[in-house]
Amino acid sequence: MSEKEPQNILKGVQHVILILSGKGGVGKSTMTTQLALSLVQAGKTVGVLDVDLCGPSIPRMLNLENNDVHQCSEGWIPVYTDPSKKLGVMSIGFLLQNRDDAVIWRGPKKNAMIKQFLTDVVWGSLDYLLIDTPPGTSDEHITVVENVKNVNPDGAILVTTPQGVALSDVRKELSFCRKTGIPILGIVENMSGFVCPNCTECTNVFSTGGGESLAKLCSVPFLGRVPLDPRLTQCVEEGKSFAEVYHDTPAQKAMTDIVDKLLVQS
């Protein structure tokens, strides 16, 4: 394992944000990629660190599969989405021979890999580093928190859906942040209604408003609600930027509002 310290390798990073969810399937990784792309559209340089070791979906969502990680004298070089190097990514997905390969590791090996990601990736100068974590509150989360505390992370964004089960799980995530001293930047309610791509009418498939109610109950900021949009799903599957292709849709307007709130908090 590297003997480097995160505060040294991350000294050029202005803002570190964790993306958390209480359960899987709420669109956390989709939210991470779209927030990153929206921040790039706002003129920021962004890095995405994918520490969801058992489900590394970020490379596919950003159309970066089959790229190799290269090394320099300082450490690992992120994989960039284009020559401008405005958006860099690091994920265990780049280290697997096949995207269908399972990562069958016990806790200590996972923790060592995450620490290496946090100490050996040469991000250079970044405005934002988004850390996409696995669902829940496990060893991986503790390792991330312990290793980024010295760089004073901005805090965590909690992603949920409107259903009661998801809201119950995100309460555990709120408790985790408070117990570990990570500031809570706010809650995002994802899949909040379905937007028809033809008439743009929104239908509340899974109900709506649960995330906002939870934010008020727990006295944390509510960053916004993002509706379901099949065009967003298509962009994620094809590795395209929803912010560029469908910038005038309700879902992207919601994403832009969330980014604007983050920029104000920064």
Image: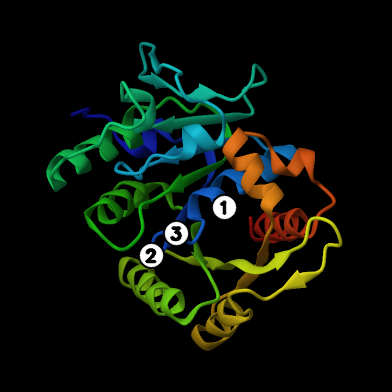
Q: Taking 23 as reference, is 156 left or right?
A: right
Please state the horizontal and vertical placement of residue 193, each as a whole percent of the image: 67, 70
Q: CA distance from mark 2 to mark 3?
A: 7 Å
Pointers 2 and 3 in contact (C-beta within 8 Å): yes
Front residue of this view, candidates 15 and 89:
89
Residues marked 1 and 3 touching at CB (< 8 Å):
no
Q: Reading the chain from its start, which is encountered first: label 1 or label 3?
A: 3
Quarter of the C terminus within the rendering: bottom right
Q: Which residue is mark 1?
A: 31
Relative to residue 226, is residue 160 drawn left or right?
left
Are the two marked residues, 1 and 2, in contact with CB atoms closer than 8 angstroms? no
Is 188 situated left or right of 67 in this image? right
Closer to the observer: label 1 or label 3? 3
Q: Circle 2 sits on which residue?
A: 23
* Res 88 → quadrant: top right
Density class for disc 2 (Cα within 10 Å; few <14, some 14-19, many ≥20) is many
Amino acid under disc 2: Lys
Figure quadrant of the N terminus: top left
Spatial CA distance of label 1 from label 2 is 14 Å
For marks 1 and 3, give the CA distance.
11 Å
Q: Check disc 2 and report its element: helix, strand or loop.
A: loop
Residue at 73 percent across and 61 percent down: it is 254
Residue 12 in sight from this viewpoint: no
